[in-house]
Image (spheres, helix red, strand yellow):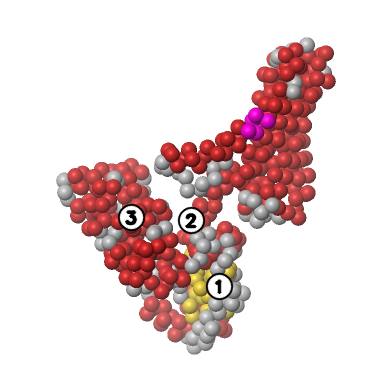
Amino acid sequence: MEQSQIDLTLEEVRAALESGQILNAIAALIRLHPADRADAFSDLNDKYQATLLPRMDIPTVADLLEELEDDEAANVAEVLPTERLADVLDEMEPDEAADVLGDLPPELVAEALAEMEDADEVIPLLGYPDETAGGLMTTSFIALRPHTTAWQAIEFLRQVSPEEETPYYLNVINQDRQLVGIVGLRDLVVAEPTARVESFMDPDVVYVTTDMDQEEAARLMVRYDLAALPVVDETGVLRGVITYDDLVDVLEEEATEDIYRLANVSDPDLSIDSPISLSVQRRLPWLFLNALTAFFASWVISQFESIIAQVALLAVFLSVVAGLGGNSATQSLAIIVRAIALGDLELHDAWRTILKEAAIGLLQGLSVGIVAGLGVFLWKGNPVLGLVLGLALVGNMLIAGIIGTMVPLGLKALRLDPALASSVLVTAVTDSFGFALFLTLAVQFLPYLR
């Protein structure tokens, strides 16, 4: 839905609330898609939200909690009476309910679980860390036994009436609840009614363990184009399933983390709506680190004060050397960090990758150096100054390709996040090296530059 339609609905909701027509306000909200409804609800002030919540039915509040951001969902859950909160959590998917409970105070969690009817489906999920496959999975899934016939399986599906989110293939478990195969609905429908599931199931199942990182699980789902991914424990017992909607959430979360960390923002939960104090608190430390590296680059320049005093024009081109070197390094850095994140680059490929990026940096440096050197010659009429700048760019962009590759690989080898500190370190090295190379070349050609 277009934002303008959501805004019109918001105006209608506010007008209805101001006139005391709460049911009309709820009716207007319900016309929106659940995701849009959550956005509209978030834009209402606390007073309006508190007015609407007690009058919304349980399924509507459940949809709302499933679509809201984690912190907003927790805030809404905390203001609900315990009995009503328990009913809402029972209405939600087990994994979504566990996510909400995981953000609530322990005493409220205990009270809500005590009131819930389906607490046994949610409690196992609370024991897994949020960023693991166990923390991502849902316990709401359908499983068949190998000896079940196709006709019995179809009758079973008619009885349980699977929800829309249930994927179009079913897990097969043995008497010990261990995962032994998988069956697609198409295979089930076309099979002979008396055929046993074990005769047409696929025993080669892609699955993950409960302690696997959620990013690895999402990568497997993308690699094998899966709508759902079974999750087993260390003994092979089927504990849950990760569905495609969870995959989208993980990919968005991981992409946000990588983008933020490349920009030296360590908290992926920051957003445009975050409080100013929190934004400053989480972003400022990296700027201090950046200031330290900038001072180091300035110290490098200070070692050549005398030559800059003799040829002041050199100072004009320092930013050219630093800017192009930094951009070249950022290109290599982004490609390498992405390759590491997707599992396309391992440490045993390090030297091959470093040599390749060095070659790319050299070719880019030659191309840009020639153009920049000619430009300086035409601008200032000094071919030697153009030569010095061109050579400095070749050397700096060569180093940029190497450093932009080595730093994230080095951080990975140290079991650190390659995206978090790479840009600060790479910028510091390329700036400092570029300044030193440019000014050292200038010293060698000083008689021709005066």
Residue for point 72% across, 27% down? 300
CA gap, disc 1 and disc 2: 21 Å
Residue 76's tag is 3
Read off the residue under disc 1: 232
Q: Secondary structure at mark 3?
A: helix
Identity, as a three-letter code, of the amino acid under mark 3: Val
Number of residues whose C-alpha sits closer than 10 Å to that of mark 2, classed few (under 14), some (14–19) or many (20 or more): few
For the record, the magenta segment spans 292-296
Q: Position of residue 229 (x, y in %)?
A: 54, 67
Q: Are marks 3 and 1 in contact (CB under 8 Å)?
A: no
Rendered view: 62 above or below 336 = below
Q: Nearer the viewer, residue 339 or 436?
A: 436
CA gap, disc 2 and disc 3: 21 Å
In the rendered image, residue 429 lying in the magenta stretch gets the answer: no
Rendered view: 425 above or below 163 = above
Number of residues whose C-alpha sits closer than 10 Å to that of mark 3, classed few (under 14), some (14–19) or many (20 or more): some
